Amino acid sequence: MKILIACEYSGVMRDAFTKKGHDVMSCDLLPSDKPGKHYQGDVMDIINDGWDMLIAHPPCTYMSNSGVCHLHKDPARWVELFKAGEFFKGFLDADIPKIVIENPIMHKYGKQLIGNIKQSQVIQPWMHGHAEQKATCLWIKGLPLLTESNNVKEEMMLLPKNKRQRLHYFPPSPDRWKLRSTTYAGIANAMAEQWG
């Protein structure tokens, strides 16, 4: 398959599908963290290039439930929210047979902007071998739901909260957003195994 991994700089998802023998390109405004087929630029420039599958990770800063409180503190964020909603909707409406869009739990304004289209499922890293909690929504078209590949919830629950919710406890830093948004390898491998 010809697969586009949108809004990915890490190469984790791209590499998982490449290992399965697919023609895969990642795309982001940032350069790729590791060597591989990567388009640095606006994904909408290449979205109509005959892809069989799209896996998109649109920015969640303005759409996620965790950031909704900031909307009322800064009116400029509303403008960014509308841009984010339009960008997300561009992936939902793409003319690609198989589509997966990944994002955190979305707040009510974000849901309205994408037409109140409910996510297909919610997954967690612990379902795929990572002893961590981070609810991740998937909007899926043309593919089955992702099934658990390695459930480690029992082991995870033995860990202290700051370990199993490691991403939430990252101290402030210039790279905090990047570390928090990197795809878990277990999730990428499960997607490549089940959908590739």
Image: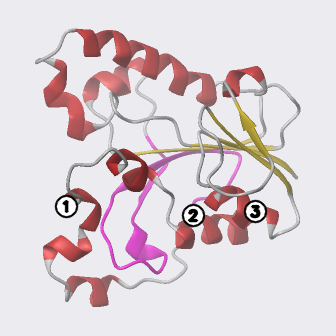
> SS for tag 2?
loop
Rendered position, 74 above or below 138? above
In percent of width and height, residue 70 lies at: 16, 26
Label 3, on which residue?
Answer: 17
* Left or right relative to 74: residue 96: right
The kind of residue on which mark 1 rests is Tyr
Label 2, on which residue?
Answer: 146
Rendered position, 16 above or below 75? below
* Left or right relative to 169: residue 121: right
Q: Residue at x 69, y 22 (%)?
A: 44
* Left or right relative to 82: residue 192: right
In percent of width and height, residue 144 lies at: 65, 58
In percent of width and height, residue 3 lies at: 79, 47
In this picture, which residue range is highlighted in magenta?
Answer: 119-147
Residue 196 visible to the viewer: no
- Coloring applied to the structure: secondary structure
From the image, which quarter does the C terminus lie in?
bottom right
Q: Mark 1, mark 3: which one is toward the viewer?
A: 1
Label 1, on which residue?
Answer: 169
Q: Of the residues under marks 2 and 1, which one precedes in the sequence?
A: 2
Residue 23 visible to the viewer: yes
Q: Residue at x 50, y 83 (%)?
A: 150
The kind of residue on which mark 2 rests is Leu
Res. 14 mark: none
Q: Residue at x 88, y 66 (%)?
A: 21
Q: Mark 2, mark 1: which one is toward the viewer?
A: 1
Distance (Cα) linking label 1 and label 3: 30 Å
Q: Residues within 10 Å of mark 3 (few under 14, many from 20)?
A: many
Q: For residue 132: magenta?
A: yes
The kind of residue on which mark 3 rests is Phe
Q: Of the residues under marks 1 and 3, which one precedes in the sequence?
A: 3
